[in-house]
Amino acid sequence: MSHEHLENEEDRGMNLLFSNDRPGEYPPSLYAATRDTLPAFPQQRGEERADVVVVGAGYTGLSAALHLAEAGFSVMVLEAHRVGFGASGRNGGQLGSGQRLEVDELERLAGVPAAHRLWDMAEEAKALTRDLAARAGVPVADGIAHAFRKPAEFEHARGMIEMLGRDYGYDRIEALDREAFRALVPSNAYIAGELDHGAGHLHPLNLALGMARLADAAGAQIREVSHVHRIRHGRAGEKSIVQTSKGRVVCDHVLLAGNGYLGQLDNQVAARVMPINNFIVATEPLRARAAEVLTRPIGVHDTKFVVNYWRLDPEGRLIFGGGENVSYRFPKDIAAKVRKPLLEIYPGLADVRLTHAWGGTLAITMNRMPCFARPAPNCLSASGYSGHGLALATLAGKLMAQAVAGQAQGFDTMAALPSRPFPGGAALRWPLLVAGMGWYSLRDRLGF
């Protein structure tokens, strides 16, 4: 991407790397305020060489770099801002089970044998993430609840709990009727729920920083404030060239791990992966009032299309995400946007002070399953985790590393899933998303 093109995109507010954040700075999140220390990494300058260049230092890129370095490859990670700057460092911190689609949907999409493989891969993703968190010294709290608004949702969930136990060997999910769920989540907004004892939650930025520390120790070279402008993919037997603001890196393989911040680096992927913004607030420590929100230190998410999700951190702060916007730019008052759904669930917290409010960019796909692709013979891409990326992105990096090393079975299992472009491709996906989100948010408000 040329400097002129970059500036034009920034002028239009369309370059999400620079539309809403200060260059090289973390957003004003609770996570950034409570993060572990990690010295800054140098900027990419001049001509450098590596076996593999990874574009993006979130979970996908850092996991790929760690696994490649441990396998003996020379690897360089190029990050436009800071390690964990994007969705990896600002998300809800929920380590969920399974794929983004439930197993009945997976069976319809890909068939029963593939659905079982995908479930097993998701369990592997969760175990890998827990292992890396333990290695990085990041605590994981157990338990994620799913809050239901309608009886039909609860009935379907009970069927899925039975199916998972019978056919998939997973018996960690507990169905909770109205009374039992309200004893756990004291809100009148929901009629029932379920609790997944095998899921969990953590400090997401510290996980990214910890993965960077592990990758660095394994020999990966990480370069921060090193925005990739363009990539020239080598033909058979040729090197690829990855151009940054201050230099370039010559390499054999390129891994695209930018997710919602990929921009125009690859239009094949851009047509299939849609960046959207989401918003989170954090309260002051609730202390004795924490039991008004949750009676156990679990995470929760609900069934709205524009999903609400929340948890308490170890200091008793409520971290609550919700609210959509239909612009590439964040709203001026994020706190006001997120306070509205928060108070719909917990009206008694109207007097509680919000200390932090931030936005972030994730990426979705048409079928809500990740988009694994080979944009060029020596290039792999994984993105579009659709709000279920904490574990799956971490696994995606490992699968890309294995594919570079010649073991592509896991990567190919994901790449075989149908991945349709958005109607109109990259050019029309945004106005269509605006229309679609407007329709679904109206359905949410009307209670459908």
Image: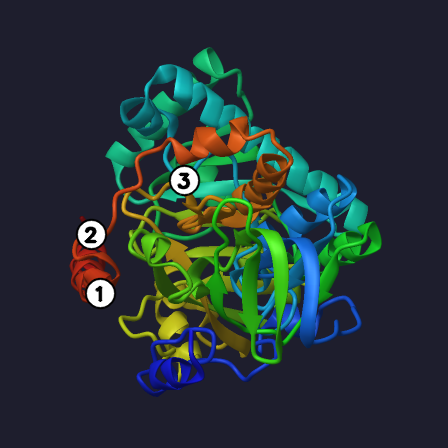
220 or 47, nearer to the observer = 47
Which disc, if any, is residue 414?
Answer: none
Q: Amino acid at mark 2?
A: Gly
Residue extending farthest to the top is 166
N-terminal-most mark, 2 or 3:
3
- Where residue 350 sits: x, y (%)? 44, 74
At horizontal 34% and vertical 88% (from top left) the residue drawn is 11
Report which residue position mark 2 lands on: 447
Assess disc 2: are there few (<14), some (14-19) or many (≥20) residues with their C-alpha within 10 Å of its C-alpha: few
The scheme the figure's colours follow is rainbow
- Where residue 404 sits: x, y (%)? 60, 39
Label 3 element class: loop
At horizontal 53% and vertical 29% (from top left) the residue drawn is 410
Taking 215 as reference, is 144 above or below it? Answer: above
N-terminal-most mark, 1 or 3:
3
At horizontal 55% and vertical 77% (from top left) the residue drawn is 356
Taking 423 as reference, is 161 above or below it? Answer: above
Query: Looking at the image, how many numbered discs can be counted on the residues?
Result: 3
Taking 435 as reference, is 376 above or below it? Answer: above
User: Which of the image's four quarters has the N terminus?
Assistant: bottom left
Judge from the rendering whether residue 326 lies leftward or rightward of residue 255; answer left or right: left
Judge from the rendering whether residue 159 lies leftward or rightward of residue 281; answer left or right: left
Report which residue position mark 3 lands on: 100
329 or 65, nearer to the observer = 65
Assess disc 3: are there few (<14), some (14-19) or many (≥20) residues with their C-alpha within 10 Å of its C-alpha: many
Report which residue position mark 1 lands on: 427
Label 2 element class: loop
Q: Quadrant of residue 369?
A: top left
Report, in whole angstroms, how far the alpha carbon at label 2 lies from the one at label 3: 22 Å
Q: Amino acid at mark 3?
A: Arg
The label nearer to you, 2 versus 3, is 3
